[in-house]
């Protein structure tokens, strides 16, 4: 018996074949000269399929919008800047995941003191970076109902609005889309005038619970309106485990950061302050 055949027998003993079966099989081998054994996927490597894949696989794929192709002289400059941003967000991701894992934080609000400070830019890039961690699943919800920006920033089409999902007009599976294996998105196409009422109503808690129950993500990120311009943060704070504050290195004042810290203190955990557009 050569080495290949002895290995084959070792595998067959795992399948529970009787001696009689073996003799039949030996005859088959003699007749064909080829032996095939069915080995279930992952049984030797110990790699198992993530059970969450089943429900993530049911989500509609996000429709990517066509990226504008810049002229060649700009292309290199843009690629270099993009690479630097990717590296910065990968570093942030490492610290962020340490906080998430060591302190058991799952639902994180992302917000800035003022409009335009970079909440959406940071939330999208951090979510993308997290989605590149094998086995890590993130959901990013655009809860800036007043001025949604996640779809445009990440480059996909938003087909519905978060408020329709929050109020149950459209179902979870109609609304939430899959950006890639590690990232799902809840998007809004247009601004809603009654944003504050919706966030205050407690519907956010139900939506986040449904999302967490169905998709079992490692992280849920909520993109919020500017903290010092609207009162939406206070409605959301009871339903999140932590807040990531995004400050603009070129315009945010220290007193604004202090005011945001005061509003968050004793109501949620401030995970950290990210200096966007900061100089190294
Ligand atoms: N670090 C950065 N590098 C390059 N562009 C940036 C950076 N941060 C933000 N921007 C750009 O600045 C603009 C405003 O950023 P963004 O939409 O993230 O702000 P925001 O805080 O979400 O604003 P709002 O509160 O109105 O939603 C966007 O065009 C975004 O692409
Ligand atoms: Mg925004």
Image (spheres, rainbow, N blue to C red):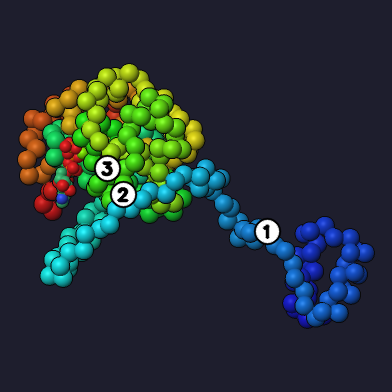
Q: CA distance from mark 3 to mark 2?
A: 9 Å
Mark 1 vs mark 3, CA separation in Å: 41 Å
Q: Is residue 109 visible?
A: no
Percent position (x, y) of residue 223? 27, 36
Classify residue 169 by image quadrant. top left
Q: Which residue is found at the position 32% from the left and 18% from the top?
A: 201
| Position in image of residue 192 (x %, y %) | 24, 29
Q: Quadrant of residue 237?
A: top left
Which mark's residue is nearer the viewer, 1 or 2? 2
Residue behind mark 3: 150
Locate residue 121, reporting x and y percent: 22, 46
Which label was assigned to residue 40?
1
Q: CA distance from mark 1 to mark 2?
A: 38 Å
Horizontal side of residue 106 vs 77, given as left or right: right
* Mark 1 vs 2, N-terminal side: 1
Give the vertical position of 53 relative to 242 (above or below).
below
- What residue is disc 2 on? 156
Disc with the residue nearer the chain's start (3 vs 2): 3
Numbered disc total: 3
Identified at 50% across, 48% down, the residue is 57
Q: Residue at x 20, y 22 (%)?
A: 231
């Amino acid at each position: 018996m050569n080495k290949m055949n002895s290995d084959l027998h070792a595998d067959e003993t795992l399948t529970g074949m009787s001696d009689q079966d073996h003799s039949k099989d030996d005859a088959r081998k003699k007749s064909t000269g080829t032996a095939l054994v069915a080995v279930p996927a992952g049984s030797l490597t110990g790699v198992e399929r993530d059970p969450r894949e089943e429900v993530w696989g049911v989500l509609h794929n996000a429709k990517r919008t066509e990226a504008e192709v810049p002229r060649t002289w700009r292309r290199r400059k843009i690629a270099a800047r993009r690479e630097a941003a990717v590296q910065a967000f990968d570093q942030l991701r490492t610290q962020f995941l340490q906080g998430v894992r060591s302190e058991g934080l799952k639902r994180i609000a992302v917000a800035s003191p003022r409009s335009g400070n970079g909440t959406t830019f940071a939330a999208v890039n951090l979510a993308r970076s997290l989605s590149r961690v094998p086995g890590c699943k993130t959901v990013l919800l655009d809860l800036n109902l007043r001025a949604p920006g996640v779809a445009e920033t990440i480059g996909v089409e938003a087909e519905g609005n978060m408020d329709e999902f929050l109020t149950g007009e459209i179902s979870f599976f109609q609304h939430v889309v899959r950006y890639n294996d590690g990232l799902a998105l809840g998007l809004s196409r247009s601004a809603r005038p009654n944003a504050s009422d919706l966030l205050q109503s407690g519907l956010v808690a139900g939506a986040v619970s449904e999302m967490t129950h169905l998709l079992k993500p490692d992280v849920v990120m909520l993109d919020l309106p500017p903290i010092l311009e609207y009162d939406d943060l206070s409605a959301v704070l009871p339903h999140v485990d932590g807040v990531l504050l995004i400050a603009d290195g070129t315009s945010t004042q220290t007193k604004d950061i202090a005011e945001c810290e005061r509003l968050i203190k004793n109501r949620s955990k401030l995970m950290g302050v990210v200096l966007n557009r900061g100089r190294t």
